[in-house]
Image: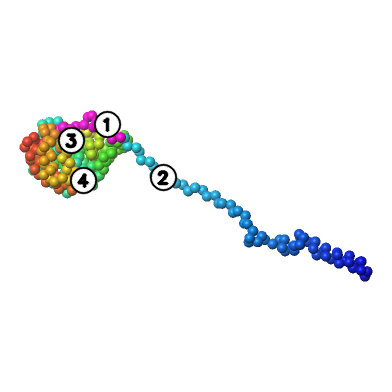
Amino acid sequence: MRPRALSALALGLVLLVTGCGEAGKSPEKAAAPPSASASPSPTPTPVTKPSPTHTTPAKPKLRPVPKKLPAGLHRASGSNGVALTFDDGPDPRYTPQILAQLRAAQVKATFCVVGKQAKRYPELVARIVREGHQLCNHSWHHDVNLGRRSAAEIRSDLERTNEAIHAAAPKAPITWFRQPGGRWTAEEVAIAKQMGLRPLHWSVDPQDWDHPPAKTIIKRVKGATRHGSVVLMHDAGGDRAQTMAACRHLIPDLKRRFGIALPR
């Protein structure tokens, strides 16, 4: 073969070998995946649905505390006699003691009954009525802010308490209502009257709820009581041993000096 022909043949073979893929690269290299040093493509952030939130319903706003007591409260017995009232019961420790003292003195008192206590101790409610004493609604669970709540809440509370009292003493009249803590509002007084409940306040408060000694309770009651007074004391709601001791002196003493009568 001639030299010129050989050169042309060699050149053709070289072009055939290097003609596939990019210049200077084998087909394998051209198809190879990117190296680890190459920047990865951004991964899309998964879209998550917000989880439902469980919020506590806002409590209804309370009315402001009145600056003075509303009109229409009964703060006198309606007679020359002194009215004795006992709040927060009935209680199996102390209510029977007061009932025994009243029976021994042959006088009657008004028991301001808490609905939960009436439901828990119905036999004591029945005994109070059976022994001739008067009943007073004192709210379901001694809610000092009851008068500041909505009209519907006030009515529901009083109705629930009346139902518990009547479950224990079906035919007993419930003459009175007393707001715990004396935090009366005009709205509450109006609702109680609509339900046939007369608002019973007090004129003598020896603060026996604060557990003073019996001699202090006696001194406070004797110093403040007049004809027609309404005396506030407690036969439940804590340790009432000092009240029981004070009443052993006060009941006969008040009967002798003023007479004891139910409010009217």
Mark toward the start of the polypeptide (4 vs 3): 3
Q: Quadrant of the N terminus?
A: bottom right
Q: Which residue is mark 1?
A: 186
Q: In the displayed structure, does residue 159 sit left or right of residue 12?
A: left
Label 2 to label 1, Cα distance in Å? 33 Å
Q: Position of residue 196 (x, y in %)?
A: 23, 32
Q: Measuring 86% from the left and 65% from the top, which residue is drawn there?
A: 11
Answer few, some or many: residues within 10 Å of disc 1's Cα (few below 14, many 20 plus, some between 14 and 19): some
Label 4 to label 1, Cα distance in Å? 26 Å
Answer few, some or many: residues within 10 Å of disc 2's Cα (few below 14, many 20 plus, some between 14 and 19): few
Mark toward the start of the polypeptide (3 vs 1): 1
Instruction: Kindly check if marks 2 and 3 are in contact, taking CB atoms under 8 A apart as contact.
Output: no
Q: Measuring 21% from the left and 31% from the top, which residue is drawn there?
A: 73
Q: Measuring 56% from the left and 51% from the top, which residue is drawn there?
A: 45
Above/below status of 1 relative to 169: below
Above/below status of 32 relative to 147: below
Disc number placed over residue 202 in the picture, else none: 3
Q: Position of residue 115 (x, y in %)?
A: 24, 42
Q: Looking at the image, which is closer to me, 143 or 211?
A: 211
**Label 3's element?**
loop
Q: Which residue is mark 4?
A: 237
Q: Looking at the image, which is closer to me, 4 or 61?
A: 4
Q: Quadrant of residue 237?
A: top left
Label 2 to label 3, Cα distance in Å? 43 Å
Q: Which residue is mark 2?
A: 55
Q: Majority secondary structure of the magenta segment?
A: loop
Asked whether residue 95 appears in the rendered view, the answer is no
> Where does the magenta region start and end?
64-77
Label 4 to label 2, Cα distance in Å? 35 Å
Q: As shown in the figure, which amino acid type bears the numbered disc 3?
A: Trp
Above/below status of 79 relative to 144: above
